[in-house]
Image: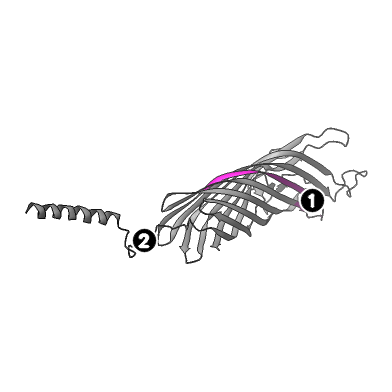
Amino acid sequence: MRLGLLCLVIGSVAFASNSKLAPPSKNTPVPFDADLFRRDAQVISGHGEFLYWRVQEGALDYALKMRGQAWGPTPSYAQGVFKNGTFNGDPGFRLAMSFFRAPKYWEVKWQYTRLTAAGSNSANAPTAANQFLTGTWPQLIATPLRKARSYLHLNYNTADLLVDRFFNPNPHLRLRLIGGGTVAWMNQDWNIYYSNALGQASHVRNRWKYVGGGFRVGTMVDWYWGLDVYVTALATTGLLMGSYQNQAEQTTSMAVDAADNPSIPVRHSKYQDVRSVYTLQFYFGPSYQKNFTNNRIEVFLGYEINSWFNIHEVYRSTASTAAASKETWINGSGIALQGLTTRLTVDF
């Protein structure tokens, strides 16, 4: 009896030990979200983005349109509603290639962004008596004005070479810490035209150009919500140093004095320096991400804003004779490029 009981105990212990050491069955199911991001697959990815952005700038006033009666015959200050130059919504693109090094969990990425933006505005003189359209730049033609027009054109280019470190705090979250180099080259042309009923005209042209390079850092997050739908967000900041040029010109068809020469610009200045420029980038929106046997795709649709500081300036000055001094007035504002960003990413 005692011998049988001892054999039973030994057999139970051996069975329990073998059960713990035995490998799992081949039929054990793997959780569907065990590797949502294919973090152990070394891949090259292609990225194509369509952008539909609008450029927002300040300091682009070109005329005042009166809505009430004039002060009187003596000089007065600005009266009326400011008319400002604005941009339309315009398409652009961003192209990128990246290489993900598994299982080291770092990635290198090159990308290029291009946008050409334009906008036109005009204002006609009021029809009411004793109300006028006036320029916010010197008109240099006989008053009153009949019409004022504004035309804007911006070329925007950036290129980045970035390296990021990949983290999975949990199976549903992918976090990238990003850093690298960035370059930007952009230029803007702003033309203003004043005309009156006598056929006289005045033309103001403002141009600036910036070329610079520096560093960019930031972070990117993909958060899985279910049904292959994620929330994707990115935020970066950059600091660049580069060459800045700004030119202002004005011509008029009206000669105030017989010695004046309308073929020579009445305003013709150029400013240049080396300056630092600060930029911020942010986008946010839903994305669809799906794993296949040999590939993975991502489709993103969201809102993006890129802000630039210390770059957009408008140079004005006081008037005096050729040999006398002219004081400089500088108006400036930030630039914001904002709107729709869509992206398709395919891993190979």
Question: Could you say whether the residue bearing mark 1 is in a helix, strand or loop?
Answer: strand
Quarter of the rendering occupied by the N terminus: bottom left
The answer to whether mark 1 and mark 2 are in CB contact below 8 A is no
Amino acid found under the numbered disc labelled 2: Val
Left or right: 275 with respect to 280?
right
Query: Percent position (x, y) of residue 49?
Result: 59, 60
Q: Which mark is residue 30?
A: 2
In this rendering, is residue 169 above or below 49? above
Q: Is-magenta flag for residue 81?
A: no
Residue name at image x 70 percent, y 42 percent: 313
In this rendering, is residue 79 above or below 43? above
Instruction: Determine the residue located farthest toward the right in the rendered image.
Output: 259
Residue name at image x 55 percent, y 55 percent: 100
In this rendering, is residue 344 above or below 2? below
Colour convention: one colour
Instruction: Determine the residue located farthest toward the bottom in the rendered image.
Output: 293
Are there few (<14), some (14-19), or many (20+) residues within 10 Å of tag 2?
few
Question: Could you say whether the residue bearing mark 2 is in a helix, strand or loop?
Answer: loop
Mark 1 or mark 2: which is in front?
Answer: 2
Residue name at image x 8 percent, y 51 percent: 2
Left or right: 169 with respect to 161?
left
Amino acid found under the numbered disc labelled 1: His
Q: CA distance from mark 1 to mark 2?
A: 72 Å
Q: Which mark is residue 303?
A: none
Magenta-colored span: 192-219
Q: Earlier in the sequence, mark 1 or mark 2?
A: 2
Quarter of the rendering occupied by the C terminus: bottom right
Q: Which mark is residue 203?
A: 1
Q: Quadrant of residue 96?
A: bottom right
Instruction: Determine the residue located farthest toward the left in the rendered image.
Output: 1
Instruction: Determine the residue located farthest toward the front in the rendered image.
Output: 3
Q: Nearer the viewer, residue 61 or 270?
A: 270
